[in-house]
Amino acid sequence: MSDYRIERRETVASTMDAARERAAEGAAEGIWIIADRQTEGRGRQGRVWRSGASGNLTASLLLRPKRTPAETATLSFIAALAVVDALRALGLGASIALKWPNDVLVEGEKIAGLLLEAGGGEAGAWLVLGVGVNLASAPDVDELTDAAARPTALSRHGVDAAPEAALAALAPAFAARYGRWRAEGFAGQRDEWLAQAAGLGAPLIAKSGAEEISGVFEDVDEDGALVLKTGTTRRRVHAADVYFPGAV
């Protein structure tokens, strides 16, 4: 995807839904939908995504990667790396870490979240990547559903950036990494993700439904699964919420 297009909306239910509509119309991949405000934003597992006041980045990208579901699931890791690229390009000098599976942390607090949704239909298979980055403000702590992910915003770290500027940094960064992913898969950038992984080598708790797994974060495999050492065994976790001891 060497080129991309940007469609700006004032208010949408969600940029994810707007991108899905463009997919149903048969639009080619590479369309970024950016909105000033979304009224029904969502995160993983149907959670509400708090867009906050105007000034934050709320955007979704339509893709048609033509790969297996297991392969396309790793694009959340590629997108996280692109968010890091964009934040650095905007001038952020603070420490950044990537929390499995799809959060970006600055100084240990959440600044960005990612969401992937896939579908098909007569127009062909599609994938929508949703990106939310707190630029000007962050949600109040008492509004959060995940107590382990305290929020922050780029402005709190001495960097002022409008949503348009943030997307102007993010879109080419993702395009470059997406091109590498198409050529090399996740394996080509996995080491970069691991080098910035939050909690690598430390104890953590993975919660999925009623199941809770405690172990040491050893790795993320080439399919994007979390690898935990639990006693004398190793567990691969494909979907869960991750908590660090003391933050639950």
Image (cartoon, helix red, strand yellow):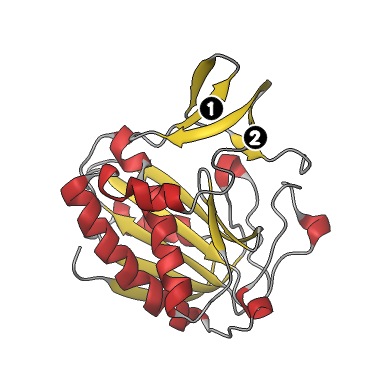
The C terminus lies in quadrant: top right
Label 2: how many residues lie within 10 Å, few (<14), some (14-19) or many (20+)?
many
Position of residue 78 in the picture relative to residue 199 (left or right): left
Q: Which of 56 and 170 is in front in this view?
A: 170
Tag 2 or tag 1, which sits nearer the N-term?
2
Residue 142: where, in percent of width, then height? 83, 56
Say which quadrant the N terminus sits in.
Answer: bottom left
Q: Mark 2 points at which residue?
A: 204
- Which type of secondary structure does the marked residue at label 2 adopt? strand
Seen in the image, is 31 located left or right of residue 207? left
Q: Residue at x 31, y 66 (%)?
A: 31
Looking at the image, is 51 positioned above or below residue 185?
Answer: below
Q: Which residue lies furthest to the top in this view?
A: 232
Residue 208 lies in quadrant: top right
Q: Position of residue 121 (x, y in %)?
A: 27, 41
Which x, y percent locates residue 210?
Answer: 68, 21
Residue 115, position as x, y percentages in the image? 48, 50
Q: In this view, does 171 lie above or below 22?
A: below
Tell me the distance, in whole angstroms, between the alpha carbons under discs 1 and 2: 9 Å
Circles 1 and 2: CB distance less than 8 Å?
Answer: yes
Residue at figure coordinates x 44%, y 56% from the top left:
80
Which secondary structure, mark 1?
A: strand
Q: Which residue is drawn at 52% across and 32% down?
A: 239
Residue at which label 1 appears: 228
